[in-house]
Image (tube, rainbow, N blue to C red):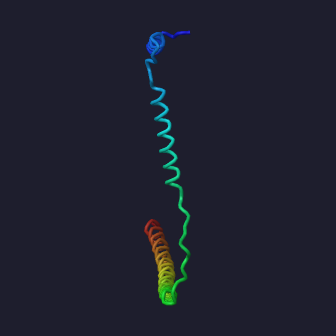
Amino acid sequence: MDSGTRSSYLRARGRAAGVDAVPRSGVRTLWRVLATAIAAAVVLGLSPAVATAAPRRPSDSQIEAARASADSVAARIGTLSGELTAAQAAVDDATAASAIALDGYQATQADYEAARAATARTCSTP
């Protein structure tokens, strides 16, 4: 059944004249072939290449340099660990000293409050 669209009308007119009014099937086929070829080229061109280089063994000088570097790093870690231990000991000492000072302050504050209460009782008694 004819839907009445312009393209159906033109196709029908072309068929009546014996000529295909829309000769695009060849162009469509060309575009499809071209798009398929491009897609295949992209897929084949972007596939990961197999590594062909054989691994090399490091030279003796490279091994010695790596060992020296590792020893240097280990020494630095030891130094930093010692410094960290000393700093933690200083923090612990300061924490203990502040706890002792707080105890002294709280004792003095309690004595002050007791003396003030005693003074208030003495002054308020006739």
Viewer-proximal residue, 104 or 95?
A: 95
Q: How many marks?
A: 0
Nearest the eye: 87 or 30: 30
Q: Pick the residue in front: 95 or 112.
A: 95
Looking at the image, is 14 positioned above or below residue 96? above
**Quadrant position of the C terminus in the picture:** bottom left
Residue displayed at 45% across by 71% down: 116
Q: Residue at x 49, y 75 (%)?
A: 106
**Residue plotted at (47% across, 83% down):** 87
Q: Is residue 117 above or below residue 107?
A: above
- Image quadrant in which the N terminus is located: top right
Q: Is residue 89 visible?
A: no
Q: Position of residue 54 (x, y in %)?
A: 56, 75
The image position of residue 83, as x and y in percent, is 47, 86
User: Is 13 above or below relative to 101?
Assistant: above
Image spot of residue 90 (x, y percent): 47, 84
Question: For this rendering, which residue is in front, 67 or 84?
Answer: 67
Residue appearing at x 51%, y 11% in the figure: 3
Name the spot of residue 15 as percent of width and height, x first: 48, 13
Q: Is residue 47 visible?
A: yes
